Image: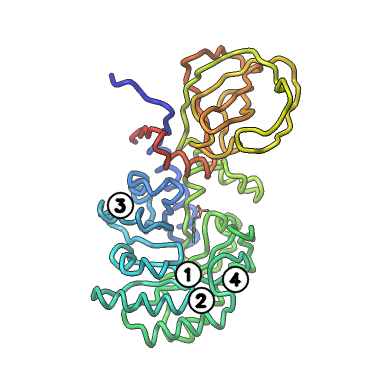
Amino acid sequence: MTERRYPAVVIDHGKVQHNVKTVCDWCQEEGIFVAGVIKGANGMVSVAEDYVAGGAKMIASSRLEQLKRCKEKNLGVPLMMIRVPMMSELSELVQIADYSLNSEIATLRALDKAAADQGKIHNVVLMADLGDLREGFFDSEELVATAKEVEDTLPHLHLAGVGTNLGCYGSVMATEDKMQDLAEIAEAVEKEIGRPLEIVSGGATSSLMGVFGKYMPKKINMLRIGAAILTGPLEDMCTCYGYSEMNALSDEAFTLEAQVIEVKKKASHPIGQLGVDAFGQKPEYVDRGIRTRALVAIGRADYGDIGDLVPTILGMEVIGASGDHTILDIEDVKEPIKVGDIITFKLKYSAILRVTGSENVKRFERSK
Ligand SMILES: *Cc1c(COP(=O)(O)O)cnc(C)c1O
């Protein structure tokens, strides 16, 4: 048997697929299809395959490199670029992606040329900024006028629809009035161009609250979902929005395994004159006396922030980390922990993003 190597991120494809299918079923009941967003797992193609197997009708990412890998695998569903494209990537965008989200007429005009050069028609979705203040037209009249210009003057673009994004920069929630606003914009565009739109894209994981709340306007027929599927109910989002439906998802689709390299009783308050830590910060240390601690061989260089690691062993606490070491308080853990043991953590979104992208973290894929 080959020796397992650590640290390792374990991807449980059965659990990813369960999450995809659960989310797709919720959405389908409300007449909504899902674009599976793969950027949170660094665009792993095996995860994209789980999305398709679980019922996602499109694969989406903010990075062309990730969509390119999917295109090479021929997943059988359209690919969508969800970061408003750079001027410098338009010809690659046309080559790789079938759809893109857009918010600038200058880019759309250049995109039309890039598509013409390749003899293709590229599908675009115009983004409305409903107050979250990241991408999108802030002025809905400008969006409608742009839609008209695309329709009438850019023959190598097909205006496939409109969309919005919430809960990113501005933490704005996908409340009923926001979803209604988007539906009204879609209607205004349809009136202006004289035909129905195929896509009205109501947002990301944060818009699932409209699905749970059963208030999605009929017009909205697509959501772009990543986080819910990758993290399950671990994200702070579901506690904040209070939707228990999320508990049907697994929070163990991605877990992290790290090996214990030291176990000792130590003081809990540093000893000596205190300056700054490994990251130049001046943290507060609580003196809890002498405690048993385990050191594991993984650090912030691999996963980012200790708050994004969730121990699976009762009584274990992550108390600190440097770039390559993580310190666990195991004083209150019932079972014995010794050097060489493997410790498993659940992961929040940013940690999944980091560990799947780290060359130091091995990937272990558990097939369905
Ligand atoms: C990242 C992203 C998504 C997916 O967001 P999740 O919260 O991971 O579901 C959807 N749309 C856009 C434009 C994004 O950038």
Residue at image point 55% right, 21% down: 295
Q: Nearer the viewer, residue 277 or 52?
A: 277
Beta carbon at label 1 within 8 Å of ligand 1: no
Q: Earlier in the sequence, mark 4 or mark 3?
A: 3
Q: Earlier in the sequence, mark 3 or mark 2?
A: 3
Nearer mark to the viewer, of 3 and 1: 3
Q: Position of residue 179 (x, y in %)?
A: 58, 67
Q: Which residue is mark 2?
A: 186
Which corner quadrant of the image does residue 130 belong to? Answer: bottom right
Q: CA distance from mark 2 to mark 1?
A: 7 Å
Residue 180's disc is: 4
Horizontal relation, residue 73 to residue 284: left or right: left
Instruction: Name the kind of residue labelled 3 in the image.
Output: Arg
Instruction: Name the kind of residue labelled 4 in the image.
Output: Gln
Q: Which residue is mark 3?
A: 69
Q: Position of residue 98 (x, y in %)?
A: 33, 66
Beta carbon at label 2 within 8 Å of ligand 1: no
Which corner quadrant of the image does residue 85 belong to? Answer: bottom left
Q: Earlier in the sequence, mark 4 or mark 2?
A: 4
Instruction: Name the kind of residue labelled 1 in the image.
Output: Val
> Where does the C terminus fall, quadrant-wise?
top left
Horizontal relation, residue 2 to residue 349: left or right: left
Nearer mark to the viewer, of 3 and 2: 3
